[in-house]
Amino acid sequence: MTHQKLEIEELITSFQEFLIYEKGLSKNTVEAYKSDAIKFTHYADLNNLNKNVMTSYFLELSEFNYSIDSKQRMYSSIKQYLNFLEVNGIINHVEIEDIQFKSALKLPDVLNVSEINKMINFYKHDSFLNSRNRTILDFLYSTGSRVSEVINVNLSDIDTKDSFVRLEGKGSKQRIVPLGSLLIDNLIDYINIRDSNMNLESNRLFLSKSFKKLDRTAVFRLIKSTGVKLGFSKDLHPHILRHSAATHMLEGGCDLRTVQEFLGHSSVSTTQIYTKVTKEFLEEAFTESHPRS
Protein backbone atom coordinates (compact mmCIF):
# COMPACT_ATOMS: atom_id res chain seq x y z
CA MET A 1 0.00 0.00 0.00
CA THR A 2 1.45 3.37 -1.02
CA HIS A 3 2.02 6.17 1.48
CA GLN A 4 -0.47 8.40 -0.34
CA LYS A 5 -3.16 5.70 -0.33
CA LEU A 6 -2.62 5.16 3.40
CA GLU A 7 -2.97 8.89 4.05
CA ILE A 8 -6.25 9.02 2.12
CA GLU A 9 -7.65 6.04 4.02
CA GLU A 10 -6.70 7.64 7.34
CA LEU A 11 -8.34 10.89 6.22
CA ILE A 12 -11.58 9.14 5.28
CA THR A 13 -11.59 7.24 8.58
CA SER A 14 -11.18 10.51 10.49
CA PHE A 15 -14.02 12.06 8.50
CA GLN A 16 -16.21 9.05 9.27
CA GLU A 17 -15.49 9.40 13.00
CA PHE A 18 -16.25 13.13 12.79
CA LEU A 19 -19.66 12.38 11.28
CA ILE A 20 -20.47 9.76 13.93
CA TYR A 21 -19.22 11.39 17.10
CA GLU A 22 -19.44 15.12 16.39
CA LYS A 23 -22.33 15.33 13.95
CA GLY A 24 -24.30 12.39 15.32
CA LEU A 25 -25.46 11.25 11.91
CA SER A 26 -27.18 7.94 11.32
CA LYS A 27 -25.25 4.88 10.17
CA ASN A 28 -26.75 4.99 6.67
CA THR A 29 -26.03 8.70 6.27
CA VAL A 30 -22.45 8.24 7.46
CA GLU A 31 -21.86 5.45 4.95
CA ALA A 32 -23.32 7.56 2.14
CA TYR A 33 -21.19 10.59 3.09
CA LYS A 34 -18.10 8.38 3.36
CA SER A 35 -18.72 6.95 -0.12
CA ASP A 36 -19.17 10.45 -1.55
CA ALA A 37 -15.94 11.64 0.09
CA ILE A 38 -13.98 8.69 -1.33
CA LYS A 39 -15.25 9.39 -4.86
CA PHE A 40 -14.39 13.06 -4.54
CA THR A 41 -10.89 12.32 -3.17
CA HIS A 42 -10.20 10.13 -6.20
CA TYR A 43 -11.44 12.92 -8.49
CA ALA A 44 -9.66 15.97 -7.11
CA ASP A 45 -6.21 16.95 -5.91
CA LEU A 46 -6.77 18.29 -2.39
CA ASN A 47 -3.75 20.56 -2.81
CA ASN A 48 -5.31 22.33 -5.79
CA LEU A 49 -8.94 22.94 -4.91
CA ASN A 50 -10.76 26.08 -5.99
CA LYS A 51 -14.23 27.19 -7.06
CA ASN A 52 -13.68 26.16 -10.67
CA VAL A 53 -12.60 22.65 -9.71
CA MET A 54 -15.71 22.32 -7.56
CA THR A 55 -18.00 23.64 -10.31
CA SER A 56 -16.46 21.18 -12.76
CA TYR A 57 -16.99 18.31 -10.31
CA PHE A 58 -20.67 19.11 -9.79
CA LEU A 59 -21.15 19.60 -13.54
CA GLU A 60 -19.84 16.08 -14.11
CA LEU A 61 -21.97 14.82 -11.24
CA SER A 62 -25.04 16.29 -12.93
CA GLU A 63 -24.48 13.93 -15.88
CA PHE A 64 -25.06 10.82 -13.79
CA ASN A 65 -28.52 9.30 -13.67
CA TYR A 66 -28.78 9.78 -9.92
CA SER A 67 -32.02 11.02 -8.46
CA ILE A 68 -32.21 14.71 -7.59
CA ASP A 69 -32.25 13.80 -3.89
CA SER A 70 -29.05 11.76 -4.30
CA LYS A 71 -27.33 14.59 -6.16
CA GLN A 72 -28.35 17.06 -3.48
CA ARG A 73 -27.08 14.72 -0.78
CA MET A 74 -23.74 14.37 -2.57
CA TYR A 75 -23.50 18.14 -2.76
CA SER A 76 -24.15 18.39 0.98
CA SER A 77 -21.71 15.61 1.84
CA ILE A 78 -18.88 17.20 -0.16
CA LYS A 79 -19.53 20.56 1.51
CA GLN A 80 -19.34 18.79 4.87
CA TYR A 81 -16.14 17.02 3.82
CA LEU A 82 -14.48 20.26 2.72
CA ASN A 83 -15.50 21.92 5.97
CA PHE A 84 -13.93 19.02 7.88
CA LEU A 85 -10.70 19.34 5.88
CA GLU A 86 -10.60 23.10 6.43
CA VAL A 87 -11.23 22.90 10.18
CA ASN A 88 -8.40 20.39 10.48
CA GLY A 89 -5.99 22.59 8.55
CA ILE A 90 -5.68 20.20 5.60
CA ILE A 91 -6.98 22.66 2.99
CA ASN A 92 -7.67 26.38 2.78
CA HIS A 93 -11.21 27.67 2.45
CA VAL A 94 -12.79 26.72 -0.88
CA GLU A 95 -15.75 28.68 -2.20
CA ILE A 96 -18.55 26.52 -3.57
CA GLU A 97 -21.36 27.71 -5.80
CA ASP A 98 -24.81 27.41 -4.25
CA ILE A 99 -26.44 24.63 -6.24
CA GLN A 100 -29.98 23.30 -6.32
CA PHE A 101 -30.17 20.28 -8.60
CA LYS A 102 -33.92 20.73 -9.09
CA SER A 103 -33.06 23.54 -11.47
CA ALA A 104 -30.43 23.56 -14.19
CA LEU A 105 -26.94 23.88 -12.86
CA LYS A 106 -25.38 27.24 -13.63
CA LEU A 107 -22.80 26.65 -16.31
CA PRO A 108 -19.52 28.44 -16.92
CA ASP A 109 -19.30 31.08 -19.64
CA VAL A 110 -18.87 29.84 -23.17
CA LEU A 111 -15.72 30.65 -25.12
CA ASN A 112 -16.27 31.81 -28.67
CA VAL A 113 -14.52 30.14 -31.60
CA SER A 114 -11.92 32.91 -31.85
CA GLU A 115 -10.97 32.51 -28.19
CA ILE A 116 -10.65 28.75 -28.53
CA ASN A 117 -8.46 29.10 -31.62
CA LYS A 118 -6.24 31.54 -29.74
CA MET A 119 -5.80 28.98 -26.95
CA ILE A 120 -4.95 26.14 -29.33
CA ASN A 121 -2.65 28.25 -31.50
CA PHE A 122 -0.82 29.67 -28.50
CA TYR A 123 1.26 26.48 -28.54
CA LYS A 124 3.32 25.24 -31.48
CA HIS A 125 4.75 21.85 -32.39
CA ASP A 126 8.25 22.98 -31.40
CA SER A 127 8.73 20.81 -28.30
CA PHE A 128 7.14 17.83 -26.60
CA LEU A 129 5.28 19.92 -23.99
CA ASN A 130 4.08 22.62 -26.38
CA SER A 131 2.93 20.02 -28.89
CA ARG A 132 1.16 18.06 -26.16
CA ASN A 133 -0.53 21.19 -24.80
CA ARG A 134 -1.74 22.26 -28.24
CA THR A 135 -3.16 18.81 -28.92
CA ILE A 136 -4.84 18.48 -25.50
CA LEU A 137 -6.65 21.80 -25.97
CA ASP A 138 -7.75 20.82 -29.47
CA PHE A 139 -8.78 17.35 -28.29
CA LEU A 140 -10.90 18.70 -25.41
CA TYR A 141 -12.80 21.06 -27.68
CA SER A 142 -12.96 19.03 -30.90
CA THR A 143 -14.20 15.85 -29.21
CA GLY A 144 -16.18 17.48 -26.39
CA SER A 145 -14.52 14.99 -24.06
CA ARG A 146 -14.30 15.00 -20.29
CA VAL A 147 -10.92 15.45 -18.63
CA SER A 148 -11.08 11.88 -17.31
CA GLU A 149 -11.53 10.63 -20.88
CA VAL A 150 -8.63 12.70 -22.20
CA ILE A 151 -6.09 11.54 -19.62
CA ASN A 152 -7.09 7.90 -20.12
CA VAL A 153 -7.18 7.77 -23.92
CA ASN A 154 -4.60 5.41 -25.43
CA LEU A 155 -2.68 5.52 -28.68
CA SER A 156 -4.55 2.38 -29.71
CA ASP A 157 -7.85 4.27 -29.32
CA ILE A 158 -6.89 6.70 -32.08
CA ASP A 159 -7.58 5.92 -35.73
CA THR A 160 -6.40 8.83 -37.88
CA LYS A 161 -7.01 6.88 -41.10
CA ASP A 162 -10.73 6.39 -40.48
CA SER A 163 -10.95 9.60 -38.40
CA PHE A 164 -12.32 8.44 -35.08
CA VAL A 165 -11.34 7.98 -31.45
CA ARG A 166 -12.71 5.47 -28.98
CA LEU A 167 -13.48 7.12 -25.63
CA GLU A 168 -14.34 5.38 -22.38
CA GLY A 169 -16.73 7.50 -20.35
CA LYS A 170 -18.59 7.10 -17.11
CA GLY A 171 -19.45 3.59 -16.04
CA SER A 172 -16.85 2.24 -18.51
CA LYS A 173 -19.22 3.04 -21.37
CA GLN A 174 -17.42 3.35 -24.69
CA ARG A 175 -18.38 5.62 -27.54
CA ILE A 176 -16.93 6.49 -30.92
CA VAL A 177 -16.27 10.18 -31.61
CA PRO A 178 -15.27 11.51 -35.04
CA LEU A 179 -11.97 13.34 -35.46
CA GLY A 180 -11.89 16.54 -37.49
CA SER A 181 -9.09 17.19 -39.98
CA LEU A 182 -7.49 19.94 -37.87
CA LEU A 183 -7.31 17.72 -34.81
CA ILE A 184 -5.93 14.84 -36.88
CA ASP A 185 -3.13 17.12 -38.11
CA ASN A 186 -2.29 18.06 -34.52
CA LEU A 187 -2.45 14.45 -33.36
CA ILE A 188 -0.09 13.26 -36.10
CA ASP A 189 2.43 16.02 -35.35
CA TYR A 190 2.23 15.41 -31.61
CA ILE A 191 2.54 11.63 -31.86
CA ASN A 192 5.58 11.99 -34.13
CA ILE A 193 7.28 14.28 -31.60
CA ARG A 194 6.18 12.06 -28.70
CA ASP A 195 7.61 8.92 -30.27
CA SER A 196 10.77 10.41 -31.76
CA ASN A 197 12.08 12.03 -28.58
CA MET A 198 11.87 9.06 -26.27
CA ASN A 199 11.66 5.31 -26.09
CA LEU A 200 8.28 4.97 -24.45
CA GLU A 201 6.46 1.82 -23.50
CA SER A 202 3.34 3.65 -22.31
CA ASN A 203 0.25 3.35 -24.49
CA ARG A 204 -1.24 6.53 -23.01
CA LEU A 205 -1.66 9.26 -25.58
CA PHE A 206 -0.98 12.19 -23.29
CA LEU A 207 1.88 12.04 -20.79
CA SER A 208 3.27 14.34 -18.11
CA LYS A 209 6.53 16.25 -18.57
CA SER A 210 8.27 13.35 -16.80
CA PHE A 211 6.57 10.95 -19.28
CA LYS A 212 4.28 9.43 -16.66
CA LYS A 213 0.49 9.16 -16.78
CA LEU A 214 -1.05 12.61 -16.97
CA ASP A 215 -3.39 13.58 -14.13
CA ARG A 216 -6.40 15.88 -14.25
CA THR A 217 -4.68 18.54 -12.14
CA ALA A 218 -2.11 19.10 -14.88
CA VAL A 219 -4.92 19.62 -17.39
CA PHE A 220 -6.64 22.08 -15.02
CA ARG A 221 -3.39 24.04 -14.72
CA LEU A 222 -2.89 24.04 -18.50
CA ILE A 223 -6.35 25.50 -19.19
CA LYS A 224 -6.11 28.10 -16.45
CA SER A 225 -2.55 29.22 -17.25
CA THR A 226 -3.29 29.50 -20.98
CA GLY A 227 -6.24 31.77 -20.28
CA VAL A 228 -4.09 33.93 -18.01
CA LYS A 229 -1.30 34.18 -20.61
CA LEU A 230 -3.82 35.27 -23.24
CA GLY A 231 -5.34 37.85 -20.89
CA PHE A 232 -8.79 36.27 -20.81
CA SER A 233 -11.07 37.75 -18.16
CA LYS A 234 -12.91 34.45 -17.71
CA ASP A 235 -11.58 32.04 -15.11
CA LEU A 236 -11.19 28.88 -17.16
CA HIS A 237 -11.28 25.17 -16.46
CA PRO A 238 -11.55 22.17 -18.81
CA HIS A 239 -15.32 21.76 -18.72
CA ILE A 240 -15.74 25.11 -20.47
CA LEU A 241 -14.27 23.58 -23.64
CA ARG A 242 -16.76 20.69 -23.53
CA HIS A 243 -19.57 23.15 -22.84
CA SER A 244 -18.42 25.40 -25.70
CA ALA A 245 -18.25 22.46 -28.12
CA ALA A 246 -21.84 21.43 -27.34
CA THR A 247 -23.12 25.00 -27.58
CA HIS A 248 -21.36 25.67 -30.89
CA MET A 249 -22.76 22.46 -32.37
CA LEU A 250 -26.29 23.43 -31.37
CA GLU A 251 -25.78 26.94 -32.72
CA GLY A 252 -24.54 25.40 -35.96
CA GLY A 253 -27.81 23.52 -36.40
CA CYS A 254 -26.94 20.12 -34.92
CA ASP A 255 -29.91 18.37 -33.33
CA LEU A 256 -30.06 17.66 -29.61
CA ARG A 257 -29.95 13.86 -29.95
CA THR A 258 -26.73 13.98 -31.96
CA VAL A 259 -25.09 16.28 -29.41
CA GLN A 260 -26.25 13.85 -26.71
CA GLU A 261 -24.41 11.00 -28.45
CA PHE A 262 -21.37 13.21 -29.08
CA LEU A 263 -21.06 14.10 -25.39
CA GLY A 264 -21.87 10.61 -24.12
CA HIS A 265 -24.89 11.69 -22.12
CA SER A 266 -27.17 8.84 -21.10
CA SER A 267 -30.20 11.13 -21.16
CA VAL A 268 -31.13 13.91 -23.57
CA SER A 269 -32.45 15.87 -20.59
CA THR A 270 -28.84 16.34 -19.47
CA THR A 271 -27.88 17.71 -22.88
CA GLN A 272 -30.72 20.22 -22.68
CA ILE A 273 -28.79 22.25 -20.11
CA TYR A 274 -26.62 23.41 -23.02
CA THR A 275 -29.59 24.93 -24.82
CA LYS A 276 -29.67 27.75 -22.26
CA VAL A 277 -26.81 29.59 -23.94
CA THR A 278 -28.09 28.68 -27.39
CA LYS A 279 -31.43 30.28 -26.54
CA GLU A 280 -29.61 33.55 -25.89
CA PHE A 281 -27.80 33.17 -29.22
CA LEU A 282 -31.09 32.59 -31.05
CA GLU A 283 -32.73 35.58 -29.40
CA GLU A 284 -29.82 37.80 -30.43
CA ALA A 285 -29.85 36.44 -33.97
CA PHE A 286 -33.61 36.96 -34.18
CA THR A 287 -33.33 40.56 -32.98
CA GLU A 288 -30.58 41.33 -35.47
CA SER A 289 -31.98 39.57 -38.53
CA HIS A 290 -35.75 39.08 -38.41
CA PRO A 291 -37.82 41.78 -40.13
CA ARG A 292 -40.48 41.66 -37.44
CA SER A 293 -38.20 41.58 -34.42
Image (spheres, rainbow, N blue to C red):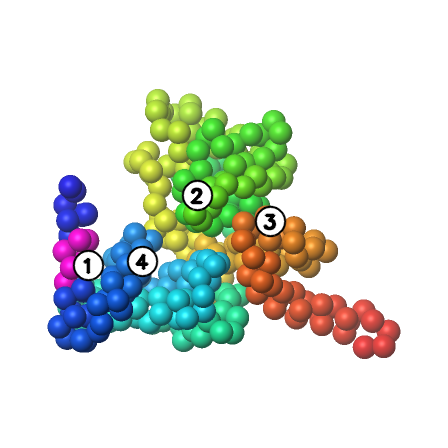
**Callout 3: SS:** helix
Dots 3 and 4: beta carbons under 8 Å? no
Q: Disc 1 residue type?
A: Ile
User: Does 142 sit above or below residue 287?
Assistant: above
Dots 3 and 2: beta carbons under 8 Å? no
**Callout 1: SS:** helix
Residue 7 left/right relative to 36 = left
Q: Disc 3 residue type?
A: Glu
Q: Which residue in the protein does label 3 denote?
A: 261
Please tell me how crowded label 3 is: few (under 14), some (14-19), or many (20+) other residues with Cα within 10 Å: some
Point out the tag, 3 or 1, that comes first from the N-terminus: 1
Magenta residues (range):
8-14
Point out the tag, 2 or 4, that comes first from the N-terminus: 4
Looking at the rendering, which quadrant does residue 114 occupy?
A: bottom right
- CA gap between label 2 and label 1 equals 25 Å
**Callout 4: SS:** helix
Q: Disc 2 residue type?
A: Ser
Residue 185 part of the magenta segment? no
Which disc, if any, is residue 172? 2
